[in-house]
Image (cartoon, rainbow, N blue to C red):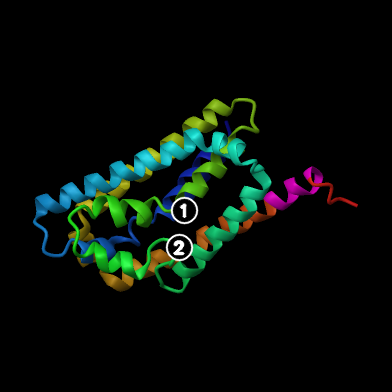
Amino acid sequence: MQPEFAISAFATVFAIVNPLGNIPFFFAITEGFTPAQKQRVAAKTCIVVLVVLFTFAVFGQWIFSLYGITIPSFKIAGGVLLFSIAFSMLQGQKSKIKITQEEHDEALQQESVGIVPLGIPMFAGPGAITTVMILVSDSSTYPDSYLYLLAIGLAIILTVAISYVVLKESGFIYNLMGKSGAMAFSRIMGLLLAAVAVNFILSGIAQAIPIYGLAP
């Protein structure tokens, strides 16, 4: 297995989940919660993220077959989606694809915020799901695909583990980074994610040309 794939898989999954960039929202959502409640919310959020991403990693190919979706078309669509999220991150905004204003307002009144909107769609949103499915589809092109699948699984687990630590220590990290620091980190992740999105689109177009007979 190419080590670059494992590093790229982790960097991509971590960038789209963006735990550090989501600290201000977690901090605001859990304002008034006791430390024990915040820890339970953090644990619930990470469990949801782990289950959702692994579910789509395992059943993603079946979903492709069920709806007749080709990998190139999904790469292009996924790349466009990821780029829109990355653009919002670069602008210092929360993407409307990840959470609506109504969900934000409703979350302030709910106790199960670890599931919605933190678990879904803030951490394990459409972008994260798309990223995992594309990485899994890419891994099938290698002879030793099981090693690449293992690398993707480890990338998800490592990202979730880091997310739990970040959320558990969100108060300390938020005070250390400040809102401006968290936003700056989010912009850096947005730039990385934009580059990944463009790569997905170009790769999808290159694969679509022979499949759809677009070559002259």
Residue 165 location, x and y as percent? 25, 48
What segment carries the magenta color? 204-211
- Residue 118 magenta-highlighted: no
| Front-lying residue, 191 or 28 | 28
The residue under label 1 is 126
**Rendered image quadrant of residue 43:** top left
**Rendered image quadrant of residue 71:** top right
Disc 2, SS: loop
Q: Residue at x 21, y 65 (%)?
A: 108
The residue under label 2 is 97
- Residue 209 magenta-highlighted: yes
Q: Is residue 193 above or below residue 187?
A: above
Disc 1, SS: helix
Q: Residue at x 37, y 55 (%)?
A: 121
Overall secondary structure of the magenta section: helix
> Is 124 placed left or right of 136 in the picture?
left
Q: Amino acid at mark 2?
A: Ile
Instruction: Kindly report the distance in space between the C-alpha atoms of the residues bearing marks 1 and 2.
Output: 8 Å
